[in-house]
Image (spheres, rainbow, N blue to C red):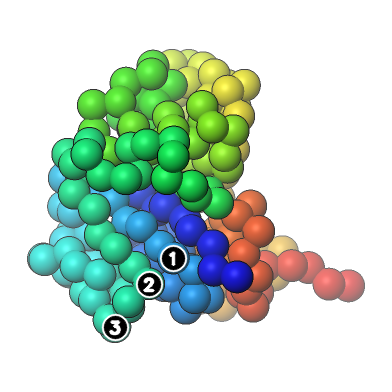
Amino acid sequence: MTRRFVVAITGASGAAYARRLAQCLAAAGEELHLIVSPYGRRLIADELDIQNVTVESLLGRPADNVTLHGYQDLASPLASGSFLTDGMAVCPCSSNTLGAIASGLGDNLITRAAHVHLKEGRRLILVPREMPLSLIELRNMLALSEAGAVICPAAPGFYLRPRSVDDLIDFVVGKVLDLLNVEHDLKIRWIP
């Protein structure tokens, strides 16, 4: 049974996490809805050298099960609780987006879709990558956690002895996939 997920990409460094997450969800055959903020687009250009963000350019291949939505399109189905989803990840999640969601702002499709997930009791995963964290950011994370969001920092583990940057990316993405209950074969578990 195909499930439906939302992935939002914002302007915190970590475009490779977003691309790998989208690739894994699309490859798993899940219905995927992408939203990219203006700074997320700039991040993708700077870090992945993708100047024109499309489904094909981000995934590296065409994908019929993936839809790219406009950042300001508040008429999108993603802005409504009647559009059922199985979860949303904001990856990477900038401090600005984190603060906007924590403050209840819904002035773009990313923050509105995040609020829909919170109010409907659906899985919302926020993947902050910025550091160090101020007291304001920590309080925002606490407020969001209390509201039902899962805070999953992009902090790869080293106990698996990663041999490449891709191993570190897969570790974080594998954790997000686990939180979305999506099966994967990324090497993230320590087995004695």
Image quarter hosting the C terminus: bottom right
Q: Is residue 50 visible?
A: yes
Q: Which residue is mark 2?
A: 65
Mark 2 lies on a secondary structure that is loop
141 over 94 or under it: above or below: above
x, y percent for residue 12: 32, 44
Image quarter hosting the N terminus: bottom right
Q: Is residue 7 left or right of residue 138?
A: left
x, y percent for residue 175: 62, 57
For label 1, count other residues whose C-alpha is less than 10 Å away and answer few (under 14), some (14-19) or many (20+): some
Which residue is drawn at the image coordinates 54% and 32% (left, top)? Answer: 120
Q: Earlier in the sequence, mark 3 or mark 1?
A: 1
Q: Toward the viewer: 76 or 32?
A: 76
Could you tell me how far apart the alpha carbons at marks 3 and 1 are, in whole angstroms?
Answer: 15 Å
Nearest to viewer (mark 3 / mark 2): 2
x, y percent for residue 102: 43, 21
Q: Is residue 94 left or right of residue 136?
A: left
Q: Which residue is mark 3?
A: 61
Q: Earlier in the sequence, mark 1 or mark 2?
A: 1
Q: Is residue 171 left or right of residue 126?
A: right
x, y percent for residue 140: 47, 21
Which residue is drawn at the image coordinates 33% and 37% (left, top)? Answer: 79
Q: Which dot marks residue 31?
A: 1
For label 2, count other residues whose C-alpha is less than 10 Å away and answer few (under 14), some (14-19) or many (20+): some
Which residue is drawn at the image coordinates 21% and 74% (left, top)? Answer: 57
Looking at the image, the residue that sits furthest to the left is 51
Q: Which dot marks residue 126?
A: none
Looking at the image, the residue that sits furthest to the right is 192
